[in-house]
Image (cartoon, grey):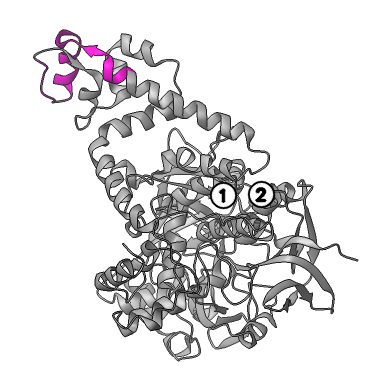
């Protein structure tokens, strides 16, 4: 009934979809297995993509040939570049999406791929022979043969939904939990844990008083995520902001005795940086209000997502508290918020390729690894998809270093440090933020995907090469073009910047604070004409590179030093327990994680600088 697939992907969330596309674009024959074809790429929580650090990840996924950025551009209803008031390293794109269009666009793009097949049924287990994965078993007893398997089960593994004192099995509202996989993996020797996440109530936008809330429009000139020719956003829909108040908090507290979070029914650890509303008012009792973002679910629906009001309190308590929020006095609720507990597998059981250490050609991606967020899941799915294809062809894995991408930071953190709570990416987690900006993701990463010969990327490769050439030419022009005092001093005076006393090169003016290339072009027609042939995005990138050249140079020096440690390889069979000079903790952690390089070993929790020195001596360095 089934052919032998190169790659079987279990789960069609954000990780599963990107995994399927990545493997298929590498040339693998892929089966995407899901319990429900109607919920492919479902935005289970908020209808948005991107944000601080997450926006950088989406652009990186796009630069590596993923589809998340393309689909977001086609379906977004609002775009904002966050942190514009800060330096370019902090600029983070975020888009409000049309939830239904997002899922539909994903499904149509997947169905259009000739290398992707689908199967709608629960996968209850994997087939393993002699430590090698051979396929999957389904709920009705079918065995589907595969050379590699990627598990992207999200919150479905033994999922339990909590609403007040009610609890029932489920992986998402209205969908059943997945069973069987956890139990089998435990038998194979894997360790598992429990995590918790939650979602807020959905409400009827027709019942809200929008005049009582603060409008939050999109950018005047919206940008996009994909580096390809996706359509521009023509019509934006606003979000709104409102706040809780002491009366809301008091009403919520009346349900604490029935809260699964406070009475011990929920054992899983929830996300630190996205707590429930009851957790907020308990942990931050001194605050008399919390901000809420009122976000539309799409262009053609009245359904509203109440961002910031995630809750597992009884539905009657949620409803009464909502009605005390400004603008929500007459609110109608579509469904209450809920918490969900699910199984995850500590990611220290994976190699940096996301392949499991216990079973060859078995990969994990997404929330099964303890992460939270669409973007984190999508990026893991893409890397797992690439590496599943490479593994079955006995090729070297595709690995991104911390200096290459936020995706590299994410995976390095997971496999070396593990996580005890849902892991979320922040810019502060990256050491090389100035190098890992959202504007240069294509220049950083598209050449890397070209090196492993992903199919259908020729236009991207050419586009990236042209952009790189244009960037060099713009910087060269700015370094050689002289500006006379008489031409620019009037403009400098208007900007409260010191006047010139002699001719200087254009790049020396651009490094001044608050002086932008677009301002100079408006002030000096000859400069505007000189730079007319170049695209606006490339001009902005060139300006950033010139303005922050000193900082960029320092980070590149740091990367070079770290890469010297990354170049020193450690083999899997290294006997760390025989090195008595290592600390006991280092021996234990190194034997468990089996780092590929000295650099990776240095980032493992519990491995000290003196332990690294011992390793360097032992390998002859």
Q: Quadrant of the N terminus?
A: bottom right
Q: Secondary structure at mark 1?
A: strand
Between 590 and 509, the residue placed more toward the observer is 590
User: Is label 2 in contact with label 1 (beta carbons under 8 Å)?
Assistant: yes
Residue 482, percent across and down?
23, 12
Residue, far left: 501
Q: Quadrant of the C terminus?
A: bottom left
As displayed, is residue 294 above or below residue 526?
below
Between 558 and 92, the residue placed more toward the observer is 558
Residue at 53% from the left image edge and 43% from the top image edge: 63
Residue range in magenta is: 477-500
Judge from the rendering whether residue 566 lies leftward or rightward of residue 150; answer left or right.
left
The residue identified by callout 1 is 97
- CA gap, disc 2 and disc 1: 8 Å
Residue 218 visible? The answer is no
Residue at 15% from the left image edge and 14% from the top image edge: 489
Pointer 1: residues within 10 angstroms few (<14), some, or many (20+)? many
As displayed, is residue 473 above or below residue 206?
above
Judge from the rendering whether residue 545 lies leftward or rightward of residue 514; answer left or right.
right
- Among the 4 quarters of the image, the one containing residue 32: bottom right
As displayed, is residue 378 above or below residue 580?
above
The residue identified by callout 2 is 101
As displayed, is residue 159 above or below residue 473?
below
Between 580 and 408, the residue placed more toward the observer is 580
Residue 223, percent across and down?
48, 36
Residue at 84% from the left image edge and 79% from the top image edge: 141
Does the magenta-highlighted stretch encompass residue 490?
yes
């Amino acid at each position: 009934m089934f052919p032998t697939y190169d790659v079987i992907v279990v789960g069609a969330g954000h990780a599963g979809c990107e995994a399927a596309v990545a493997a298929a674009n590498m040339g693998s024959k892929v089966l995407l297995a899901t319990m429900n074809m109607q919920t492919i790429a479902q935005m289970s929580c908020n209808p948005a993509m991107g944000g601080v650090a997450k926006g950088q990840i989406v652009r990186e996924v796009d630069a590596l040939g993923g589809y998340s950025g393309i689909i977001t551009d086609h379906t977004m209803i609002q775009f904002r570049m966050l942190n514009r008031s800060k330096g370019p390293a902090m600029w983070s794109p975020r888009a409000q999406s049309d939830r239904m269009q997002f899922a539909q666009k994903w499904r149509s793009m997947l169905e259009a791929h000739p290398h992707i097949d689908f199967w709608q049924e629960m996968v209850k287990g994997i087939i393993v022979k002699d430590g090698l994965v051979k396929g999957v078993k389904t709920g009705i007893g079918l065995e589907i043969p595969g050379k590699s398997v990627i598990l992207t089960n999200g919150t479905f593994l033994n999922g339990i939904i909590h609403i007040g004192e009610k609890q029932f099995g489920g992986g998402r509202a209205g969908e059943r939990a997945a069973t069987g996989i956890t139990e089998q993996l435990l038998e194979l020797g894997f360790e598992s844990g429990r995590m918790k996440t939650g979602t807020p109530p959905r409400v009827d936008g027709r019942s809200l008083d929008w005049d009582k809330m603060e409008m939050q429009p999109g950018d005047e000139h919206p940008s996009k995520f994909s580096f390809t020719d996706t359509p521009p956003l023509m019509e934006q829909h606003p979000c709104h902001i409102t706040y809780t108040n002491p009366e809301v908090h008091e009403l919520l507290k009346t349900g604490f005795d029935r809260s699964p979070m406070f009475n011990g029914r929920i054992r899983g650890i929830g996300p630190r940086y996205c707590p429930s509303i009851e957790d907020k008012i308990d942990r931050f009792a001194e605050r008399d209000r919390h901000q809420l973002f009122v976000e539309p679910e799409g262009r053609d629906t009245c359904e509203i997502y109440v961002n910031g009001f995630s809750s597992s309190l009884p539905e009657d308590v949620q409803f009464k508290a909502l009605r005390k929020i400004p603008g929500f006095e007459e609110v109608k609720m579509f469904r209450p918020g809920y918490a969900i507990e699910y199984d995850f597998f500590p990611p220290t059981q994976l190699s940096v390729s996301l392949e499991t250490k216990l079973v060859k050609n078995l990969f994990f991606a997404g929330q099964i690894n303890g992460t939270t967020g669409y973007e984190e899941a999508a990026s893991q799915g893409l890397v797992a998809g690439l590496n599943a294809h490479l593994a079955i062809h006995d090729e070297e894995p595709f690995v991104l270093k911390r200096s290459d991408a936020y995706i590299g930071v994410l995976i390095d953190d997971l496999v070396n440090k593990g996580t005890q709570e849902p892991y979320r990416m922040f810019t502060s987690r990256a050491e090389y933020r100035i190098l890992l900006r959202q504007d240069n993701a294509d220049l950083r990463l598209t050449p890397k995907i070209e090196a492993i010969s992903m199919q259908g990327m020729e236009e991207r490769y050419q586009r990236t090469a042209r952009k790189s050439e244009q960037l060099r030419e713009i910087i060269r022009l700015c370094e050689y073009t002289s500006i006379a005092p008489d031409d620019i001093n009037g403009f400098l005076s208007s900007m409260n910047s010191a006047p010139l006393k002699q001719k200087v090169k254009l790049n020396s003016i651009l490094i001044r604070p608050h002086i932008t290339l677009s301002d100079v072009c408006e002030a000096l027609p000859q400069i505007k004409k000189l730079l007319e042939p170049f695209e606006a995005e490339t001009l902005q990138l060139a300006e950033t590179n010139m303005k922050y050249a000193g900082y960029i140079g320092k980070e590149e020096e740091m990367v070079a030093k770290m890469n010297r440690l990354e170049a020193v390889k450690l083999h899997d069979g290294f006997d760390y327990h025989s090195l008595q000079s290592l600390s006991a903790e280092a021996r234990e952690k190194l034997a468990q994680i089996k780092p590929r390089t000295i650099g990776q070993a240095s980032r493992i929790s519990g491995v000290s600088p003196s332990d690294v020195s011992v390793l360097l001596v032992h390998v002859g360095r």
